[in-house]
């Protein structure tokens, strides 16, 4: 008997079922899920699982793909079609499929996938009889922004809140009160003394490739550069601020948290770095001197 999955309104063969490669759960981790035990063909604690699902959806502002009664019917149908007596039913909801952009898409229908699988209850019983071992680890969920992972939900929520505040980007602030990264860009300021400042590539930021090339551009142009952390107060008082990324290159920042930066318009340093960036950046796949590529 082949397994059956429910995918966005259809019951499909599990092995060949699929969702769009633009699905935001796949691209950003922008979704939520639930797992219920199935015992004698019936989900355990279903109302509590569905209530938690509703809370998770509300927290991410994802519309419920189905009402609770319809969802319960789909779960029952998936359990029945897979002839699961003992096992689990899994459901996941994503914000839907849309052209890739961190902020919420204007029109995307939430995606729903429900699967079920049988598990051998005697295996769990045997484990319970013998007991299990545990190790302790630091709680690092997810504490590695220097890795360019798909775990982008915090970035998605920050970008969305920026958009709702009428801003282009959000700059994250760490526990010590220093700016780390933008939701999808690196952060820079130019001090009153004309020195460029950007955070060093510590584990709190993504080591932007554009950032590394801009450091070379700055050196070529003879700009003084400090790689150190800076706080929002220093940024508010900066002569200029800008952000960098592969797709934006250099974008001058004219306002942070409602405060104009410098004269409230793009400054000369950001403009010059932007203008000269492609003189230094490599084109195509010419070999790169790896020692020079790191900073
Ligand atoms: C969190 C974050 N910081 C910085 C950047 C900029 O990196 P790059 O210049 O390599 O595009 C990105 C790019 O996606 C990013 O997601």
Image (cartoon, rainbow, N blue to C red):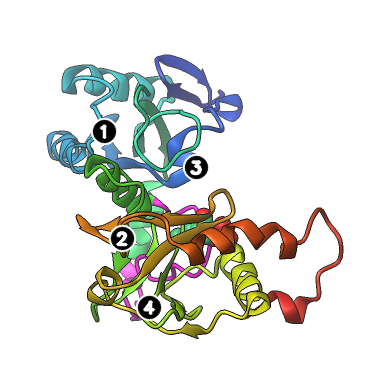
Neighbour tally class for label 2: few under 14, some 14-19, many 20 plus, Cα within 10 Å: few
Q: What crowding class fits label 3: few (fewer than 14 Cα within 10 Å), some (14-19), or many (20 or more)?
A: some
Question: Which residue bears the numbered disc 3?
Answer: 27
The picture places residue 22, in percent across and down from the top left corner, at: 52, 32
Lower position in the chain sequence, tag 3 or tag 2: 3
Q: Report if the beta carbon of the residue with label 1 is closer than 8 angstroms to ligand 1.
A: no
Q: Earlier in the sequence, mark 1 or mark 4?
A: 1
Mark 2 and mark 1: span between their CA atoms? 39 Å
Comparing 283 with 255, the one in front is: 255
Horizontally, is 2 left or right of 234 in the view?
right
Over which residues does the magenta segment extend?
Answer: 129-152
State how far apart marks 2 and 4 are (Cα): 13 Å
Mark 1 residue element: loop
Assess disc 4: are there few (<14), some (14-19) or many (≥20) residues with their C-alpha within 10 Å of its C-alpha. Answer: some
**Disc on res. 191:** 4
Query: In the shown orientation, is residue 208 left or right of residue 131?
Result: right
| Comes first in the chain, label 3 or label 1 | 3
Element marked by disc 2: loop
Q: Which residue is mark 1?
A: 62
State the residue position of label 2: 263
Task: Give yes or no for contact between labels 4 and 3 (Cβ–Cβ under 8 Å).
Answer: no
Q: CA distance from mark 3 to mark 1?
A: 16 Å
């Amino acid at each position: 008997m082949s397994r059956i999955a429910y995918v966005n309104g259809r019951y499909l063969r599990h092995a060949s079922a699929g969702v769009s490669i633009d699905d935001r759960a796949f691209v950003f981790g922008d979704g939520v899920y639930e797992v219920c035990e199935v015992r004698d063909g019936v989900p355990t604690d279903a109302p509590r699982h569905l209530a938690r699902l509703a809370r998770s959806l509300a927290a991410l502002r994802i519309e419920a793909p189905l009402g609770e009664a319809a969802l319960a019917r789909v779960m029952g149908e998936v359990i029945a079609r897979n002839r699961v007596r003992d096992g689990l039913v899994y459901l996941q909801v994503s914000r839907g499929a849309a052209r890739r952009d961190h902020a919420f898409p204007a029109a995307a229908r939430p995606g729903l996938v429900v699967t079920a699988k049988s598990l051998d209850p005697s295996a769990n019983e045997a484990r319970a009889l013998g007991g299990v071992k545990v190790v302790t680890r630091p709680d690092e969920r997810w504490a590695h922004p220097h890795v360019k992972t798909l775990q982008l939900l915090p970035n998605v929520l920050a970008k969305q809140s920026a958009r709702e505040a009428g801003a282009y980007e959000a700059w994250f602030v760490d526990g010590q009160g220093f700016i780390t990264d933008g939701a999808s860009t690196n952060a820079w300021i130019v001090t009153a003394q004309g020195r460029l400042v950007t955070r060093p590539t510590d584990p709190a930021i993504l080591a932007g490739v554009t950032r590394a090339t801009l450091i070379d551009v700055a050196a070529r142009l003879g700009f003084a550069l400090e790689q150190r952390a800076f706080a929002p107060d220093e940024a508010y008082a900066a002569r200029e601020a800008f952000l960098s990324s592969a797709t934006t290159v250099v974008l001058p920042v004219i306002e942070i948290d409602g405060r104009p930066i410098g004269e409230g318009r793009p400054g000369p340093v950001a403009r010059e770095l932007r203008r000269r960036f492609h003189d230094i950046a490599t084109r195509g796949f010419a070999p790169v001197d790896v020692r020079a590529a790191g900073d």
